[in-house]
Image (cartoon, helix red, strand yellow):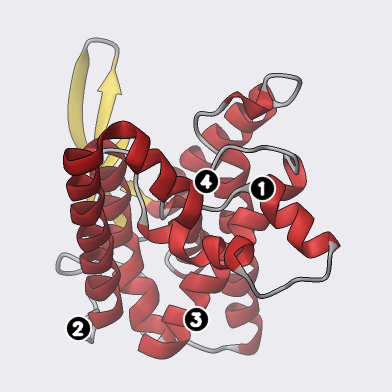
Amino acid sequence: MIPLRDRNPTRRTPIVTWGLIGACFAAFAIELWVAASGGDRALGQVFRAWGAVPAEITDALEAGSYVGQATLGMFTSMFLHGDWLHLLGNMLFLWIFGNNVEDRLGAIPYLLFYLVGGIAAALTQVVIDPQSEIPLVGASGAIAAALGAYIVLFPGARIVSLVFLGFFYQLLEVPALIVLGFWFALQLLNGVVTLGPETAEGGVAFFAHIGGFVFGLAVGLLLRVVGAGTGRDRRGYGSMG
């Protein structure tokens, strides 16, 4: 099931979501330039310097160094991506789901929510694999926080999705609760599978996705409890989001 767009109207221009997407594409353009001029080794050095390296974060936190290159990497890693597929997949999810969360929270609160969600995601992966030397890169942890908030704030929003049925596929409008619930279930399943001695071998940081989603879920539930950001029609129907 691949979400393509939602039918969830917004009241305001999602300037932060646009800005985040633009920043990720700008960072990827720099990555392409580095790779073209210095090769994969140079690009790897960029990921090492500006990605979130769990072992370095662990050492920094244990030493009481909360502000430094290691912890800064939790911010900068949100704008780096491994390849075009990684970038485009993340930006599709950010555009579909991020603009509505921004619309509910407002620009500045949403930006803070996104960045803190990304940090929560990185720290979750650090807790699971504290001695890994492999840099974490990608916006998926922060985007997962937006997904967690979306599923609470807009559970009935219709998501136009590409649904595969064996060798066939069909475009269907599926409630966000099902689309994002299915996505989270996959992250949990894949996360459990990666636990064990092979965890540090690289690949997708599923626990970063899980941590980001749970953070967003908690924020969404808090907004529901206090009644903030829930004044608009909750049905989630209308023009494209």
Q: Label 1 near label 4: C-beta < 8 Å?
A: yes
Instruction: Kindly state the secondary structure of the residue where label 3 is placed.
Output: helix
Secondary structure found at label 4: loop
Q: How crowded is mark 3: few (under 14 residues within 10 Å), some or many (20 or more)?
A: few
Q: Residue at x 53, y 32 (%)?
A: 186
Mark 2 vs mark 1, CA separation in Å: 36 Å
Amino acid of disc 2: Thr
Q: Mark 2 points at which residue?
A: 13
Q: Nearer the viewer, residue 226 or 114?
A: 114
Q: Mark 1 and mark 2 in contact (Cβ < 8 Å)?
A: no
The residue at the point 33 percent across, 72 percent down is: 100
Q: For the residue marked with disc 3, what is the amino acid?
A: Leu
CA gap between label 2 and label 3 equals 18 Å
Q: Quadrant of residue 158?
A: bottom left
From the viewer's perspective, tell me whether residue 199 is left or right of residue 97: right
Q: Position of residue 239 (x, y in %)?
A: 14, 69
Which residue has dot 1 on it? Answer: 54
Q: Which residue is drawn at 40% across and 53% down?
A: 176
- Give neighbour class at mark 4: few <14, some 14-19, many 20+ (Cα, 10 Å): many
* Mark found first going from the N terminus, 2 or 3: 2
Q: Quadrant of residue 187?
A: top right
Q: Tag 3 or tag 1, which sits nearer the N-term?
A: 1
- Of mark 2 and mark 1, the one earlier in the sequence is 2
Residue 85 vs residue 58, the one in the foreground: 58
Quadrant (top left, top right, bottom left, bottom right) of the N terminus: top left
Asked whether the viewer can see residue 7, the reply is no
Residue position marked by numbered label 4 in the rendering: 136
Mark nearer the N terminus (4 vs 2):
2
- Which residue position holds label 3? 112
